[in-house]
Image: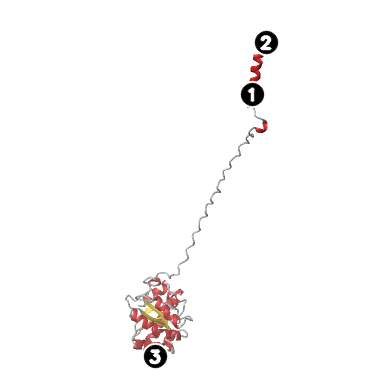
Amino acid sequence: MTRRTALAAGLVLLVLLSAACANEKPQSARSPLPYPPIPVVTETAAPTPTPSPTPTPKAKPSRKPAPRGTVGPLNTQRLTGTRAVALTFDDGPHPQWTPKLLDQLREAEVRATFCVVGVKVRKYPSLVRRIVREGHTLCNHSWSHDLKLGTRKAAQIRADLSRTDQAIQQAVPGASVRYYRQPGGKWTPAVVAVAKSLGMKPLHWDVDPADWDDTSTPEISRRVAKQARPGSIVLLHDGGGDRSRTLGACPTVISSLKRKYGITRLR
């Protein structure tokens, strides 16, 4: 290689090295090294809790009374069979309350049914005669108001009812006794059968204001008005205790029932 050629080659090499140095930046001027990518955390919404099923509230027991049928227990008579209602009075006759009640009924021109107790009939026969004389109906209500009478033997039941009928006949010979009412309404097949065999219809009721309890006069009137419907047979009392509250309620009861339904006599 000649000297000129070697010089030329050296110049070319020098130029190339200078170019390489020119392209290389100082370390401090270089772009910083990229950091590893920061992972993007996607925030996941908290799962919506499934609502607990709302407990179905328990149905409250109905306070309405059960619908009343057209017949009473063991097919006893509960209604009059007409639109008019009937008034019945139990546990008499009583020397204090029965005459006052008869006065009220006469003034209102209303007839009722008296369910009489044998021992009272024997003691106050004149009141039984007045009941019949003033056009009211008689009903056998047992000899001594024995609440367990229906559980006794048929022969005992028959003797009890027959004894009461005989006392009525002694007070009012030839009196018609077409009905029998069991004390407390405690009917049994035996007592129903005996009553029918003696020619008496078992008589129940449709309205009971519980005037036999310590019920006030206004409450007796309110209960009768609330319970009554066409054909109702209303249970009240003229004996068996202090019946002043019943006597106090009767004018309102009679007036209201007479105006709304009419009052009939059971025959």
Residue 243 visible in rendering: no
Q: For label 3, count other residues whose C-alpha is less than 10 Å away and answer few (under 14), some (14-19) or many (20+).
A: some
Residue 4 visible in rendering: yes
Determine whether, in the image, residue 46 is placed left or right of residue 263.
Answer: right
In the image, 35 versus 68, the foreground residue is 35
Q: CA distance from mark 2 to mark 3?
A: 177 Å
Which residue is denoted by mark 3 in the rendering?
Answer: 126
Amino acid identity at mark 2: Arg
Which of the image's four quarters has the N terminus?
top right
Q: In this rendering, which labeled residue sits more in front, label 2 or label 1?
A: 2
Which residue is denoted by mark 1 in the rendering?
Answer: 20
Amino acid identity at mark 1: Ala
Q: Which x, y percent locates residue 77?
A: 37, 74
Amino acid identity at mark 3: Ser
Local SS, label 1: helix
Q: Are marks 1 and 3 in contact (CB under 8 Å)?
A: no
Q: Name the disc covering residue 195, or none.
A: none
Local SS, label 2: helix
Q: Which x, y percent locates residue 183?
A: 44, 78
Q: Where, by quadrant of the figure, is residue 178 drawn? A: bottom left
Q: Residue at x 65, y 21 (%)?
A: 17
Q: CA distance from mark 1 to mark 3?
A: 152 Å
Q: Residue furthest left?
A: 82
Q: Name the disc covering residue 3, or none.
A: 2
Q: In this rendering, which labeled residue sits more in front, label 2 or label 3?
A: 2
Determine whether, in the image, residue 19 is placed left or right of residue 94.
Answer: right
Q: Residue furthest top?
A: 2
Marked residue nearer the N-terminal end (2 or 1): 2
Q: Which x, y percent locates residue 193?
A: 39, 73
In the image, 122 versus 64, the foreground residue is 64
